[in-house]
Every structure is written in C-alpha cells, then in structure tokens.
Image: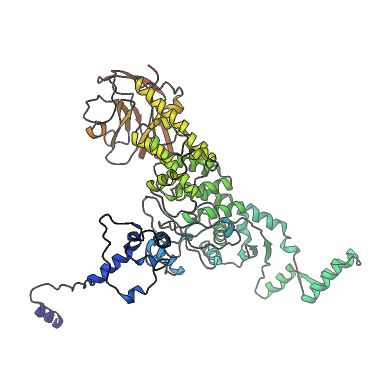
Amino acid sequence: METGTSISSMHGDKPYMPVYLPKPPTRIVAYTEQTLKAPQSALRGVVVDAREPVEPKSRRKIRMYSVGSTNRWRSPMSLGGDLLGSSQAIKAISATKNSTVYRAKTADTPQLSVAKESDLLGSAWGRSPLPSRPFTSPSRAEMSHDRRFPPLTSERPPSPPKTGMSLQIRTPYASSAKTSRTRFKNPIKVLEMFARLANQDREPDVRLHCLDQVWQLHRPYMVKSTVLEKLLSSVDSQKKQRVYKDETSQKVDSFISDSEIYSSEYKEVTRRLTSKDVEEIRMKTKSRGTITHPVVDVVLQISDPWVTRHALAIGLGHLYLDETIIATGDAVETLATACNLDFRTLISACCDVMITNLASDTVCVYLEAAVRYEQPTIISACERWLELNLVAQLSSTIYLRDVPAHTLDKILKSSRLFTYNEYSLYKTLCYWLFMQMHPNIMFMPAQTSVMTYFSSMTRSSAFLEREEGIKYSTAFGCLRLHGITDTKHLQDVMFMNIVPQSWLLRVFSHHYHALQGGGDMSFLLNFSLGASRFGFILEQEPGYHSEIISLHGFHFEAKTQRQGNTNNYVVYLQRLRPTDPSLSFRACERATFSMRRDRLVRYNLTVQHLTSDSTWRNVTSGVIEQRFGLDQKSAKSQVLRVTDVITPIYVSFAIFFPPS
C-alpha cells in the first residue's frame, strides 16, 4: 500500500506511461541506408542530370568492417566503365546469405534452432510438422554412403496449419520435402517405448542384428512379419541349442569339427562332452528359483537406403501394438521398413496415412515411394490429387519441380485434369520446365524471371527445337494452345520462344478462321482434344460463383450455386447478349462480339468433389450439342445437378464450336 501511494503521488492522477525508446542518430541511419543501397547505386549507371548521389559522412570505424565480396562497391558513385568494380558489385548483390543468417530469417520460431532434442520428442507419437522454407538438396551421390542426414527446411503450400513442432531432415530419396521429425539419438529408446505400451516387461529372447544395431525382441510378436518369421524358423529350436562349458572347449570342438581326420561319431562325442544342452541348464536354474531364457541371435541384411534406424525402430515397435501410431513425417520411411519386413498390417496403415495427408509438399514423395514399393492404391491417389491440384495448388510451390516427367505427361492427357484456363496450364508447365533447368533453386521463381530466362536465349530457334528441349516436347504437345485467345497471353507465349513457330502459326490460323467463320472451329474435329477448358473452385461460402467465358466473339456466363441450405448444387451455362450488364466496359472495350443470333455449341459440364465417405466423385453431363440463342429459353444450357457435395468443388467447362 505504501508503494502504491508513493507512485500515485509522483504521477498525480495520470496513469503510468513507459518511456519511449530513444531514436538512433540520423547520420547513423542515413549511413546504413546508403551502405545497403551502394551496390545498386554503383550499377545504376550515369545519372541523367549529371549529378552524383551525396557522399555520406566518413565513419572510419564503421568502414573498417568487410561487407560483401570486397569493399570496392561501397562507393556510392557510378562505376561507369570499371568492369572489375561492376563484377564485384554484382557479386555483392547476388551473394547468398550465410547459413546462420538464413536459418535465423527463415525459422518458424527463434527457438527452433536452439531447442534441445529432448524438448522436441516428436513424430513417434503422431505430431505433424510445421511449415518452413525449402533448402537446396544435395546430390544422391553425396548422400548414398551415409545413413544420417543433415537438417532441412522446406516450403509449405497454403493449407490449414497443423500442430506440433518438428525439424526437417534430408534423405537420399525423392524430392525436397521428405520426412520431417526430431529423431531420438538412440533409436533403441523408440523400440522400448513401444514395448512398454504393450506392457511387455519380460526379458527379450531374440537379438536382431540389423543396420549395425542390436534390437532386442520377443519371439511371440515377431510372427507378424513374414521376413522375421522365416529368420526364426531357420534357426535351430531352443531344445537343440547347446552352450559350451568354456572357451577352450569351444576351440577344441571347432578344431575337431573342421578336421577331416576324425570320424563323424568321434565329432559327435566331442560335441556332447564339451557342451551342455540348454534345457539341462534351465532345469538346474529352475530349482534355484530362476529361469534362464535362451537368447536367439538372428541377422537381417537391409541395403535399402530409405530404411533408417529410426524407421526400423518404429517398424519393430509396431510388432507389439494392435493399433498403429504413425506420424505424417515418418510415413515414407516406415513404409519402406514395412515392405522390407513384409509387415502387411503396417504397410496398410502407412498407405492410409499417406493417402489422408496428400498435400503439395508430400504428393511427389509419396508417389515415388509408392512406385518404388509397388503400392497401386497410393499411386492412384497421388495421380488423382495431381489431376485436381496441379494447377490449383502445386503450380505455386517449389515442389512442382519434383513431379516426374512421365507422370506429368500422364496427368496432362487425363480427361479429369482441372485447370482455370489453357494459359494457366501453359504457365504451370513453364514453371516446371524452368525448375528442371535449375534443380538447385531454393524459392519459387517469379513469372518475370521465367519469361526473362527463356526470352534471353537465342531467337534462331524455339527452345523445344533445340537439343536440350526436345525431351520436353511431349509435355508441351499435350497443351491446347488454341484455347489461349487473350492477346496479352499470346504475346507472352511468343516472347518466351519456347514452342516452335509452326505451332504458333497454326494457333493464329485457327483464331483467324474462327473469327472470320462466325466462331466455327473448322480445324478441330475431335471434341476431347479440341474443346477449350475453363474452370473454377467453389469453397464453402458464399455457395455461389459465376465467371464470364469469352470465345471467338461469343460470351457465356458459367454459374454454380447451392440450393438452399442443402449440400446440393446446380451447374449450367448461359449465353450473354452484347449489351448484358455482366460484361464490364473495361473487359470488353477491345473484345470481339459476334452478332449471330444462334450458335451451335458442344459442351461438357464436370463437377469433381468429395463425398461423405471421403471419396472423390466425378459427375459429368457428357458431351451435349445445343444451339444457343439470345432469348431467355434458348440461352441457357442443360442443368447439371449434384447431390451430397462436400466442398471444395472443382467445376470444369469444356466448350467447342462445330461448323454450323
């Protein structure tokens, strides 16, 4: 009370206010800003008004510190023709940050790099990894000789946050986002935890030698693994096991057994005299109140680099459990262990975990693991995820680079592939191609960087016509470039100079004939390959979405809306008049309008969504041919009704104008 009275008397009736931090001197801030901008100022060139930037006040003590490759670029004046200075300034700008600064700026929490391993007991109990940024992956040759891997951080796509804390590690398989967990220093502790969960306190009777480690197991639980069961059956039964009296007896028996001088009867007598039966030892110790359990030593050779000690501990630990405890980050290595042990129950559990946790940073890892260990259910689930989210999610993450070329070709040819429009699919393929050319890139490149890179190459031939680009022709050949009708998008395609000029000439010829022929796509006769694709994704709210589709002078409104408060949706197309208020002036100021009162259209409406039983359903209207007019009755397409829908909903429209 006395303290409170004194404070009140000091400040009167006014509340206590903390003192503001003092501002740093202006000259220090100005010098720091000038130092950071020095490389850009040096490379900027001659100023138009022939005036150089104001030279900062000299501070000898600060200028003694080394910054960048050299101190040459610190002069804020233009370098002009100084080639050596320009080179050093470029190095200072493009030099990557050191590992300490990189970890400090990209860590999810400052405690992540200094936390003890005991505080991050993670993945063995089902904790999920935190998102982080990618790191350049080492080559497989550098990693194949070692089973311990350096830490890794990886980028996470936009998705609901997950709880838990863990670290990223680099493994010698697949792509940049592998397992993510904190490993125990001694994997034996992981196995002991699983044994305690099963209330197994009995002394182990099997010693398994694998991965330069001795694993103590119990025989009754090993029958779940076909491989371990065969190893046990190959070992002599406990009753036939014998123990030598001493080391000398063992040497005598070994010498006589290896010699060809002595008869088989003599060898048998020697073995009986130099050793004792295990059962005799057990009967003697039983009378003293203790029972000796014979320990069987078995050796298992595993050369699979995907199997680590941590994963083997989890795999052996599940021998003691009826239910599985598998973290998302451990799923790949645990699957590898289960396949090497032929542990069918654990294989099925790993497949369920991987299918449930498909995301941008895991789909390519899971796909490679499924192909390696021949798991068709995971392969189908990964390909289905890519059909829906290749453009919607994966195209904006660094993990796009991990999609195999043969898988990408298969996805691009799929009739269930979702895309917003043809140009979105073309951009996704350009990003993927850029990442294949730069496999060590750490961050998702900007669109301007991709365009500048390809446009800077020689203009004598397109990229796909050169030796290094021929192998990518199959993927770009799956695109429907005639579906790109926007002028700006076509200019970008020409500017990048990836596709051959003959392809672009065919696209421009198709557009010219379509505009001159009233929209007829006379050069395209196959609906499955010639229809232009459009689409959008509908989330939970507001339950209604519409977009304008413009194609060769005809404009349609694609609509999807929910019916009341139910989980039922309707999807349809509606032709718009040139004077319809839905067409904004800014969007249609330079657009082409056809004055034809009717237009024969072939279209297909497709809705892909999750059902209540967590399975993907594909609902399609099939190919419908209809003549669209401008009056209210003929302007609307047939309605596709979908029931039992769980968002998000992937809605696709395929439109084709046959000759009419």
User: Can you see residue 306?
Assistant: no
**In this view of the protein, which residue sits in the foreground, 610 or 68?**
68
Up-down: is 439 above or below 108? above
Q: On the picture, is 285 further left or further right than 579? A: right
Up-down: is 628 above or below 248? above
| Residue 208 rendering spot, x and y as whole percentages | 64, 63
| Residue 588 rendering spot, x and y as whole percentages | 26, 31
Up-down: is 226 above or below 476? below
Residue at point 76% right, 63% down? 240
User: Can you see residue 249?
Assistant: yes
Instruction: Specify the quadrant that holds the N terminus.
Output: bottom left
**In this view of the protein, which residue sits in the foreground, 659 or 47?**
47
Q: Quadrant of residue 109?
A: bottom left
| Residue 341 rendering spot, x and y as whole percentages | 61, 54
Name the image colouring: rainbow
| Residue 175 rendering spot, x and y as whole percentages | 51, 52
**In this view of the protein, which residue sits in the foreground, 269 or 648?**
648
Residue furthest top in the image: 660
Residue furthest bottom in the image: 2
Residue at point 44% right, 42% down? 430
Q: Quadrant of residue 205?
A: bottom right
Q: How many marks?
A: 0
Instruction: Specify the quadrant that holds the C terminus.
Output: top left
Q: On the picture, is 60 further left or further right than 103? A: left
